[in-house]
Image: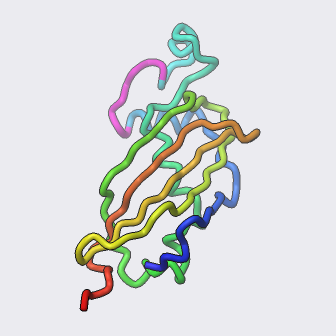
Amino acid sequence: MNREFIGRTWRAAEIYEVSREKLRDFTVAIGEMHPVYLDEEAAGKHGYRTVIAPPSFCTALWFRMGNWPMFEPEFGKQKDPVCVLGDQRVTHHRPIHAGDRLWFATTVRDIRDIGRHELFEMEHQVTSEDGAPVCTIVDQMISRGSAAPKE
């Protein structure tokens, strides 16, 4: 992979509007049935202005980004897109609510060889429409067999 990508940032092409129905679909799909994720009244009783997203919802936003590093030919991942998730850490700065309008940006933090594989670390920032932090996701992806052969 192209080490010149370290430090580059990609921002989603458009804002993501969190709908109540999308949250309900996601909640049901992952089997996380707490009432604050499904019912406005229950969310209100717990101090939220509306239903909130389960904590893992933020990690699904990167699939909507559309213009992140792995789609750029110069990054070097298109010929063999086999990657596995090595690690992921999520820091929530506040809950995601139905009705939120969110931006998503990805920065490549590191690319390095680990044996015959490469590891690339990305930091994803989810912010509100006005730029306030919502959550930070740091993940490490392992690109299988892509490291340059050692001499």
| Residue 14 in the image, given as x and y percentages of width and height | 70, 55
| Rendered view: 20 above or below 59 | above
81 relative position to 115: left or right: right
Whether 34 is among the magenta residues is yes
Question: Could you say which is closer to the camera, residue 151 or residue 27?
Answer: 151
| Residue 149 in the image, given as x and y percentages of width and height | 27, 88
Whether 135 is among the magenta residues is no
Q: Which region shows up in magenta?
A: 29-36
At 48% from the left and 46% from the top, the residue drawn is 137
57 relative position to 17: left or right: left
| Residue 71 in the image, given as x and y percentages of width and height | 52, 73
| Residue 6 in the image, given as x and y percentages of width and height | 53, 68
| Rendered view: 8 above or below 140 | below
At 51% from the left and 35% from the top, the residue drawn is 23
Residue 5, by quadrant, is: bottom right
Question: Could you say which is closer to the camera, residue 103 or residue 137?
Answer: 137
Question: Could you say which is closer to the camera, residue 131 or residue 32?
Answer: 131
At 37% from the left and 70% from the top, the residue drawn is 112
129 relative position to 61: left or right: right
At 50% from the left and 78% from the top, the residue drawn is 75
In this view, which residue lies farthest toward the top? 45
